[in-house]
Amino acid sequence: MTKNSSTATPPAAAVAKDAHWAAKLDKLRSRVRPTATMTICDDQAARQALDSARQDVLRAQISGDAPKTATAEAALADAQAAFDDAAIVLTFQALRRTDFEDLKAGHPPTEAQADEGQIVNVETFGPALISACSLDGLTVEDATSFLTEWSAGEAAQLFNTSWDLQEAIRADLGKG
């Protein structure tokens, strides 16, 4: 078997140290790349109603009044449902590391951008990254339009959602 084979036998030393190594290795091999969502809600009334309902639940819980808490939680559920109906949720998934590196290489910075220390051409890379990460089928043209037409903050959030996934860490080195 090759070193990279998914059916390779675990090293005897690893099995001796951890009897569950084979199961652990299977879990490692079947991991799914990180995903993230970006929720957009243009309905200000729905946003405000949800925020207010959340505050009402907290106040009711602090008061210790069980019936008041139950009523507030029911109102929160209704407000959340109304928000969810008004909202648009975009879902993104991290790229394979090699695909991400290839995408960056395909969008080298212009001379001026390189002089500023940028590692990619931000004008072309951003839309390409968003499209490549989108699980909703956003095209490069869609992403270009959104980055151009949306407010600076929303455009930055759209790009950052895709970029940050590439740097997501779901590991903990533990103590000591």
Image: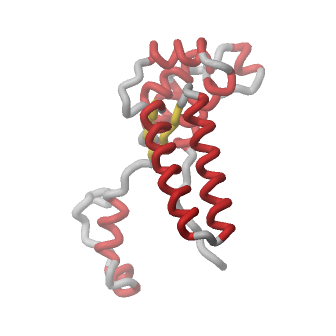
Q: Report the quarter where the C terminus lies.
A: bottom right
Q: Report the quarter where the N terminus lies.
A: bottom left
- Which percent across, then down, holds residue 93? 43, 40
Residue 134 sits in which quadrant? Answer: top left
Q: Residue at the location (26% across, 59% down)?
A: 6
Relative to 95, does residue 34 appear above or below in the rendering? below
Judging depth in this view, the residue of 169 and 137 nearest the camera is: 137
Q: How is the image coloured?
A: secondary structure
Relative to 8, does residue 162 appear above or below in the rendering? above
Residue 28 sits in which quadrant? Answer: bottom left
- Which percent across, then down, holds residue 60? 63, 62
Is residue 158 visible from the viewing direction of this image?
Answer: yes
- Which percent across, then down, holds residue 73? 52, 57
Q: Residue at the location (66% across, 19% down)?
A: 151
Relative to 34, does residue 63 appear above or below in the rendering? below
User: Disc count in the image?
Assistant: 0
Q: Residue at the location (33% across, 85% down)?
A: 19
Residue 175 relative to residue 128: left or right: right
Judging depth in this view, the residue of 43 and 115 nearest the camera is: 43
Residue 11 relative to residue 52: left or right: left
Query: Quick one: which residue is furthest to the right in this view?
Result: 116
Relative to 126, does residue 6 appear above or below in the rendering? below
Q: Residue at the location (60% across, 29% down)?
A: 44
- Which percent across, then down, holds residue 122? 62, 20
Residue 52 sits in which quadrant? Answer: top right
Judging depth in this view, the residue of 146 and 171 nearest the camera is: 146
Is residue 133 visible from the viewing direction of this image?
Answer: no
